Amino acid sequence: MKSGFIQNGYFLLFTFVTGFFYFCFYMVALSFSLSLSFTVIGIPLVTRVLRTTTTFIQFERTQTKLYTDITTEPYESKVTTGASVWAQSKLELTDRRNWYAVFWLMRKFLIGLVSLVCAAVIYVTPLACLLAPVLYRHVKMNFIFMEVDTFAESLLFMAVGVVLAAISSKLADGLAKKIGGYTRSMIRELNR
């Protein structure tokens, strides 16, 4: 196993964690700030929440470059004007780019869930197969319809684990590249 395989695993798990964070953050922050919009502090609070999209998208860009070596174009952030708080809030709230960015970042949660399940299958299954000669006495192991209860079967199961490990390396790399491509297309769409 090479370090790229492990790095892709980190990226897949990190995708789940960041997607879960974005979903929770925007769900709670927007719900709270929109529910307070009838007060004086609600609208500026929504504005502050929408301004976080630039930071999070830059973080996604850096994360994608670090783990997958996919270069993305820079995200063009907005320049704040010297206008009043209410004028700036109106600009932020009416800018469709902010709302699209929230949508893209919250959608990362679904991608994160898929990457978590895939990471579990891609990394745990070959490991369990490779450890079959050690584990078959202590854990009831089944592969498709074959129960592993002898040492010979566990060696066969271990050979299947070697094949699965080779396949998993390619699958993990492909999945990490696809998720990196999602970040690239997100930034491309938001820069339009």
Image: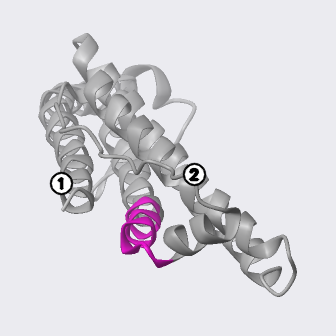
The amino acid type found where label 1 is placed reads Arg
Instruction: Give above or below for 176 relative to 178.
Output: above
Q: Nearer the viewer, residue 36 or 181?
A: 36
Which residue ends up furthest to the top in the rendered image?
2
Q: Nearer the viewer, residue 31 or 21?
A: 31
Q: Is residue 76 visible?
A: yes
Specify the segment rendered in magenta.
94-105
Tell me what residue is drawn at x 28 percent, y 59 percent: 145
Mark 1 residue crowding within 10 angstroms, few (<14) / some (14–19) / many (20+): some
Of badges 2 and 1, the one in the foreground is 2
Q: Nearer the viewer, residue 158 or 74?
A: 74
| x and y percentages locating residue 80 in the rendered image | 51, 50
Mark 2 residue crowding within 10 angstroms, few (<14) / some (14–19) / many (20+): few
Residue highlighted by disc 1: 188
Residue highlighted by disc 2: 82
Name the chief secondary structure element in magenta: helix
The secondary structure type at the circle numbered 1 is: helix
Label drawn at residue 103: none
| x and y percentages locating residue 186 in the rendered image | 26, 56
